[in-house]
Image (cartoon, helix red, strand yellow):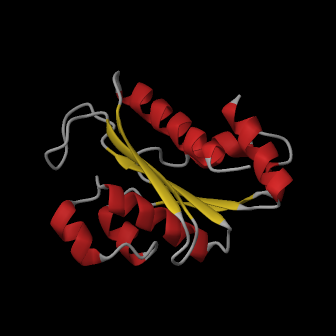
Amino acid sequence: MAAEGVVAALRAAGLTVATAESLTAGQVSATLAEVPGASEVLRGGVVAYATDVKASVLGVPAGHLERTGPVDADVAVAMARGAAQLLHADLGVATTGVAGPGPHDGHPAGTVFVAVAAPGEGPSRVRRLALDGDRADVRAGATAAALDLLRELLP
């Protein structure tokens, strides 16, 4: 299971993580929390489903959200940074996108961005996905991709 590997790698590296989730609505945090010992590495998470919450809680620049909407690579990175900073974690992981069934803000269902970032000006990585399937499939795929990206960045 990917979550077990992520928790083990975070523990081995002495790092903590926080989540910022839009379309996954807490699934990334919940998946991590299913692993025994996750409390050593998971600081917490923010479900920022509404666009204004991304700005007011996670610090995503409101002007950027107005220009691009929430389905955007830079928004995903800002969400991850915001969660890490807000929850005093070494890393943040974020998901934003369109679960479906239809398009949103000009993006087709299945368009997803996942990001991992350190707080402040630390390193970050973002990945764009085009996921197939129904709403549940897209949300599950986004959760798995977020955990995979996090695991790739850990020693």
Quarter holding the N terminus is: top right
Rendering coords of residue 78 (x, y %): 42, 67
Q: In the rendered view, does 12 fall on the left or right side of 104?
A: right
Image height of 152 relative to 110, above or below: below
Q: In the rendered view, does 56 fall on the left or right side of 46?
A: left
Q: Residue furthest top?
A: 133
Q: Nearer the viewer, residue 75 or 121?
A: 121
Q: Quadrant of residue 122?
A: bottom right
Image height of 69 relative to 60, above or below: above
Q: Nearer the viewer, residue 122 or 28?
A: 122
Image height of 53 relative to 107, above or below: below
Rendering coords of residue 20 (x, y %): 51, 59
Residue name at image x 33 percent, y 46 percent: 97
Q: Nearer the viewer, residue 153 or 83?
A: 153
Rendering coords of residue 85 (x, y %): 58, 75
Rendering coords of residue 22 (x, y %): 42, 52
Residue name at image x 76 percent, y 52 percent: 10
Residue name at image x 82 percent, y 61 percent: 14
Q: In the rendered view, does 29 fall on the left or right side of 94?
A: right
Residue name at image x 68 percent, y 67 percent: 90
Number of on-image labels: 0
Q: Quadrant of residue 33?
A: top right
Image height of 155 relative to 117, above or below: above
